Every structure is written in C-alpha cells, then in structure tokens.
Image: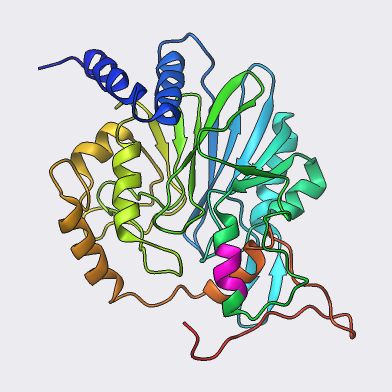
C-alpha cells in the first residue's frame, strides 16, 4: 500500500495538469504539514441556536487573523437582532491581541444572519466571499422583487474571490477554491494546512448539505466534494454546521480531516458514484423543510450582512414572499 506521503505526491502530480488551483492548494497544505510554512491557529465558537461554527483563524507569528462565517443573533418571532455570539468572538480577538485582516463568508448562508459588518466596524478588515455571489443576488433578487437600487454585482463586499485566488493571513498562505453545489457562491478557503469548507461537507457521520436552493445543483455538489477530497488526507477540515449524528454521536463536532471524509463520509465516501449521490441527495432534499431563517438570512447575507435601507419611518423591513419558494 502506498504511504500517505507517496499517495499525496502521486495525486498532486496528477492534478497539476488538470486543476492548477487545487494543485496550488495541495502544495500549500503539504508545505504547512511538513513545517516549511506556518500552520494557522484555529479557535472555533459554536452557536447552538443555528448550529453554526464560526472560526477565528490566526497566524501565531504575526497575530493577524480572519473570522470565518460569523453569526448575528436573530429572534425571528420578535424581529430583533442582538450581538451576543459576535461579542464573544470580539472579546476573544481583543484578549488575544489579534489584528483582523479578513471577514470571510464561505457562501450566502440561508440559516443564519452574518455578523461580518458588526465585526468589521469593530476591527476593520476586508469582507470577502466567492465571486459566485452574483448568481445568488440575481436569483434571490427576483424572489424578493428587489428594485434597481439593489446591486447584483457583488459590490457590497470588499473582495470577490475567484477560483484559485491567493491571499494570506499574516505569513500563512491561503487559496480560495470555488466549490458550487449547495449554492453557486460556495467557496472553500484553504488556509495553511486547513480547509474551511462551509456547507459543502458535514462531519463524516452526517454526510453532505442540501442542494435544492435556487442555483443549487447536486451534480455540482458531488464534483466539488470529490475535488476537495483530492487534498492531502492530513488536511484539517473545519465545517460551518453540525447537527450531531444521533443516536451514535450525541455531541457537536466541526473538525475532521480530508482522509476521514474521503474514506468515511456516509453520503459520498470513496466508491459512491455521482449518479448514486444525486439520487440520494434529490430524494433526501425532497423531505426537508426550508430552514427557519432562510427568508431573513438570504435578504441580509446577499447584501454582505447589511439590512435593507430604512423606509421613510426610519424602520428597516424584511420581505416575506408568499408562495414563491
């Protein structure tokens, strides 16, 4: 049997010609694992009301940092927001003496509101998402009958990442990989030896995310997951959500590895064909209710976490389209 290192080298050689962005990410992970470049320190905060994991990713040498997939508390019954979850993260950033360079969104979330603007006001940094956000803005701009004042060019964000775009957090190298399927805008941020994959994958014992939102595609989701599974097995994987895996796992978890996903993901482990995955995902999605916060979340998150402008009475409103989804 090939050693892990040999297997990784063979995969890397094979992907160089066919997927330059993935090859760059894999090389970066290998350098970080081998100690030739820094590994990020990752501290995660779990928001149980929305089952969301937010990750603070820091370069231990320079103390520069990114915040991935933050959460703004929202009481949908009262229509009120609060900042308890994001204040916990802010306190950690201040206590650790971190400088926030990036507020990263893996996609336009449909199950929680982003706190990125609130944290950006406190700490600065650039707010970024994948370039596919424009497709989400087009699709949901129609759902919510947004007027021409709603820009569908992604300009609400400071940076739109295309596939293969490189950036850094201090001295830690990073690459954005476009991984559509759950939504058109999904990106995985490969930072040092770690991949922040959003909703593309869940824990191995829970499987994969739904693909039935506007612009979602189970075929694309399968191919995106298979792409990520070509990263080195030792790659640390940080997820955006967890829902436990009852009855066998009764605790929340949000960190795994590519090797564990590749060999053990219950929906898409090695040997599962695209046709089988799509059939499973389509049948499963047909049984799922819409997320509780889909309508408020998407309206806010497609605006980079900002609310619609106040009306003439000074109040901001979110729309509730009837029989549209």
Can you tell which quarter of the image residue 125 is in?
A: top right
Can you tell which quarter of the image residue 60 is in?
A: top right
Residue 152 visible, this orientation? yes
**Camera-nearest residue between 129 and 204:** 129
x 43%, y 69%: residue? 213
From the viewer's perspective, is residue 139 above or below residue 183?
below
**Camera-nearest residue between 73 and 165:** 165
- Name the outermost residue toward the left: 1
Residue 296 visible, this orientation? no
Q: Does the magenta stretch include residue 41?
A: no
x 52%, y 66%: residue? 110
Residue 129, percent from left and from top? 60, 48
Quarter of the figure that contains the N terminus: top left
Residue 171, percent from left and from top? 63, 18
- Name the outermost residue toward the bottom: 322
Residue 170, percent from left and from top? 67, 22
What type of secondary structure mainly makes up the magenta span?
Answer: helix
From the viewer's perspective, is residue 146 above or below residue 60?
below
| Extent of the magenta region | 136-141
x 19%, y 64%: residue? 279
From the viewer's perspective, is residue 229 above or below residue 170?
below
Q: In the figure, is residue 40 to the left or right of 306?
A: left
**Camera-nearest residue between 48 and 2:** 2
């Amino acid at each position: 049997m090939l050693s892990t290192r040999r297997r990784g080298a063979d995969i890397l050689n094979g992907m160089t010609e066919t997927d330059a962005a993935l090859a760059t990410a894999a090389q970066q992970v290998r350098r970080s694992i081998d100690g030739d470049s820094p590994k990020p320190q990752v501290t995660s905060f779990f928001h149980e009301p929305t089952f969301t994991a937010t990750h603070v990713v820091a370069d231990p040498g320079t103390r520069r940092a990114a915040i991935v997939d933050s959460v703004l508390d929202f009481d949908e019954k009262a229509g009120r927001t609060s900042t308890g979850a994001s204040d916990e993260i802010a306190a950690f950033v201040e206590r650790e003496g971190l400088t926030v360079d990036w507020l990263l969104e893996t996609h336009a979330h449909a199950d929680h509101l982003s706190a990125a603007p609130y944290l950006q006001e406190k700490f600065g940094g650039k707010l970024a998402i994948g370039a596919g956000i424009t497709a989400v803005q087009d699709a949901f701009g129609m759902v919510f009958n947004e007027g021409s004042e709603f820009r569908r060019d992604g300009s609400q964000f400071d940076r739109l990442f295309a596939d293969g775009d490189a950036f850094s957090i201090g001295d830690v190298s990073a690459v954005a990989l476009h991984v559509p399927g759950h939504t058109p805008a999904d990106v995985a941020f490969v930072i040092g030896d770690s991949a922040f994959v959003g909703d593309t994958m869940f824990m191995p014992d829970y499987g994969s995310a739904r693909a039935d939102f506007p612009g979602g595609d189970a075929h694309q989701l399968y191919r995106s997951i298979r792409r990520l599974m070509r990263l080195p097995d030792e790659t640390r994987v940080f997820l955006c959500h967890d829902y436990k895996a009852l009855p066998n796992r009764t605790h929340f978890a949000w960190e795994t590895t590519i090797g564990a996903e590749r060999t053990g993901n219950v929906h898409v482990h090695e040997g599962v064909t695209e046709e089988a995955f799509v059939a499973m995902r389509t049948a499963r999605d047909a049984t799922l209710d819409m997320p509780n916060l889909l309508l408020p979340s998407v309206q806010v998150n497609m605006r980079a976490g900002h609310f619609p402008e106040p009306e003439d009475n000074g109040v901001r409103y979110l729309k509730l389209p009837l029989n549209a989804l």
